[in-house]
Amino acid sequence: MRTTIRPRFATRFTRRLLLLALLAGAAGCSASTHGPQSRELSFDGQTYRVVTLDLKRDPLSLHWRDPASGVPYGDIETLKQWGEARGLHLLFAANAGIYDRQNKPLGLHVEDGKTLVPLNMAHGNPAAGNFSLLPNGVFAIYPDGHAAVRTSAEFKADAKPVRWATQSGPMLVINGRINPHFTDDSGSLKWRSGVCAKSPTEVMFAVSETPVNFHEFAWLFRDKLGCRDALYLDGSISQIFVDGKGYAGAPAFLVKPYAGIFAVFVPQR
């Protein structure tokens, strides 16, 4: 049974998160009108939930463990309760990158500028599953508030500091081209989630509402959403939460504890 997290005095991290959320609110944005934009769309006979964030007003953050106790959140509901105990309302959440059997992020994981897990450049390890389908990549938000999806090799070569980052794999779309390792008639069908930065401040998350293969999912990002670079996050267990709409993606009985979780919090009214 997960230990209930009791309200505490704000840590340095939660104070920053509160300030970021307050600044977003000060810009004149109401959660109901200007929060994350969620839509269900059909493409090539499949149905998806797509959420678009404007990083200028939607303070996207990444969470793995309670910074005070060190206990992993594990699921979106627990993270939601953690925020409520600190006066924060959850507008959006989604699982982040692939993790290992110890429920630790398998690749790079950066929270508020602190690297909790370093970049993983190991290649061809079958135990890493989809992470080893190359190239894998990184979704990162930089200190200036801009986001990008890069291959892991490109990210390493850039050597730029980041504020939030997750590493996963494989890349779905690379410089406008679908990952050449994908085949359009693959029979590997799963609920899948992914992310792209359509522009430096426009981030799009998508999760399939039915099982799809990699090629179909990559095709969605490139041809329907217009993303030049997109990253696979995970499959089978993937879900997206949107305030007022609930959960989309994999059925609840398939969902297992997550490592990283993306979130958009705003102050409670």
Image (cartoon, grey):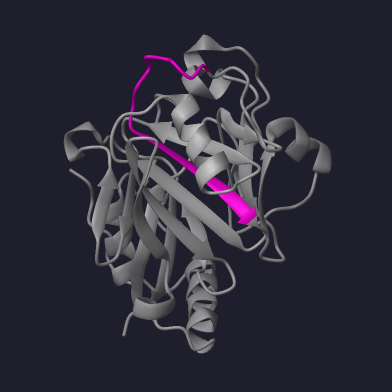
Which residue is nearer to you in this view: 65 or 119?
119
Residue lying at the far front of the rendered structure: 44
Q: Identify whether 46 is placed above or below 269.
A: above
List x then y, in percent, for residue 110. Answer: 59, 48
Q: Residue at x 65, y 16 (%)?
A: 123
Q: Identify whether 245 is placed above or below 103.
A: below
Which residue is nearer to you in this view: 268 or 91?
91
Give the magenta-colored segment's residue range.
183-198
Q: Residue at x 51, y 16 (%)?
A: 183
- Magenta region includes residue 67: no
Q: Residue at x 40, y 24 (%)?
A: 101
Left or right of 32 in this view: 16: right
List x then y, in percent, for residue 148. Answer: 67, 50
List x then y, in percent, for residue 58. Answer: 50, 69
List x then y, in percent, for residue 263. Answer: 43, 59
Q: Identify whether 99 is placed above or below 38.
A: above
